[in-house]
Image: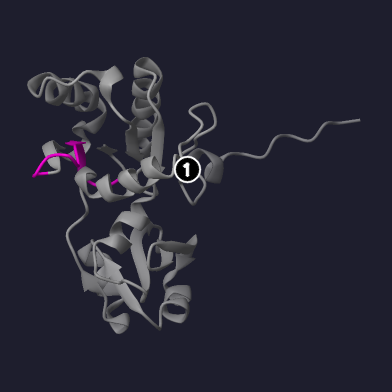
Amino acid sequence: MIHTAGGEGSVALGDTERAQAIVATEILPGRSSSERLIPAVRHLMAENGWRLNGLTAVMVVHGPGSFTGVRVGVSAAKGLSEAGAVPLIAVSRLALLAASVDGREKRVHAVLDAGRGEFYYGEYVGERCVREALMSAQDMTTVASDGLVVVCELKVAEVLVELRPKLVDEPLAGAALPFAVKRVESAQFEDTATLDANYLRRTDAEIFAKPAPRATR
C-alpha cells in the first residue's frame, strides 16, 4: 500500500491471514517521498521475504492532495503492478479520512485543505461515496451542516470551526487495507493503462497557462 498524497508519505505491507494484519510500515517524511518511495518498498519486501509477483495486489492512494506526491505514488504503483503482473487498486484519500471515524450509516463529510481558500470535500454514507468535489469555505458551511465533519489538518479545523469538525490524525498507508480486502474479494481492479490521479482540481500549469494565440486571417 502506497500513500504519498498527504504532507507525509507512507508505505505498508498487509496480510489479513496474520494476527497482525499490517506486517510492516515505513514513514517517508516531508518531501522525501519521491526519492525514498521505491527504495522503501524494496526494503520492506526484502526484509519480510516477500516477492513482487507474490502479491495479491498493489494499492495506492491516488489523491486528492499534493500534485507531485499523487503523481509519484500513482506512477510507482503502476510500475510495480506491471512489473509484478499483479492487480492494481486505487482509493481516495477522502475515503480513508471518512473511514477513520465510526460513521457506520451516518453521513460523514471528509475535508482536506486544497489551498487558495478551497477544500477537497467528500461526502460518505457508510462506505458509499455520495460525491467528491472542490469547494469554497462558504460552500462547505452549507453542504456539511448535517452529519459528522472530519478533518486531519488543524488549519482546516480552525476555518470550519462553526461545523464542529472532528480532528484526527492523517490516515497512513496501512489504513487502506480494509478497502483492499473488499476490492480483492469483489475483483474490482483498476486498468493500469487508464488509471489517473484523483486531483479534483486543475494543476497550476493549467490555471496559469496563457491562452493560445488566435490564428490571424
Q: Looking at this view, is 9 or 116 the one in front?
A: 9
Q: Amino acid at mark 1?
A: Asp
Residue 168 visible, this angle: yes
Kindly give the residue lying farthest to the top in the view shown.
83
Residue at 47%, 43% in the rendered image: 204
Residue at 82%, 31% in the rendered image: 215
The residue carrying mark 1 is 204
Q: Looking at this view, is 163 or 132 the one in front?
A: 132
**What span is colored magenta in the figure?**
6-20
Q: Is disc 1 surrounded by few (<14), some (14 to 19) or many (20+) residues within 10 Å? A: few
Residue at 12%, 40% in the rendered image: 18
- Colour mode? one colour
Q: Looking at this view, is 9 or 178 the one in front?
A: 178
Q: Is residue 148 magenta?
A: no
Asked which quadrant contains residue 35, the reply is: top left
Residue 62 visible, this angle: no
Q: Residue 65 at what x, y percent from top left?
A: 36, 48
Asked which quadrant contains residue 32, the reply is: top left
Mark 1 lies on a secondary structure that is helix
Residue at 37%, 40% in the rendered image: 184
Above or below, 131 relative to 172: below
Is residue 193 toward the left or the right of residue 24 in the image? right
Q: Residue 208 at what x, y percent from top left?
A: 53, 43
Q: How many marks?
A: 1
Asked which quadrant contains residue 54, the reply is: top left
Q: Residue 173 at what x, y percent from top left?
A: 23, 43
Above or below, 181 relative to 85: below
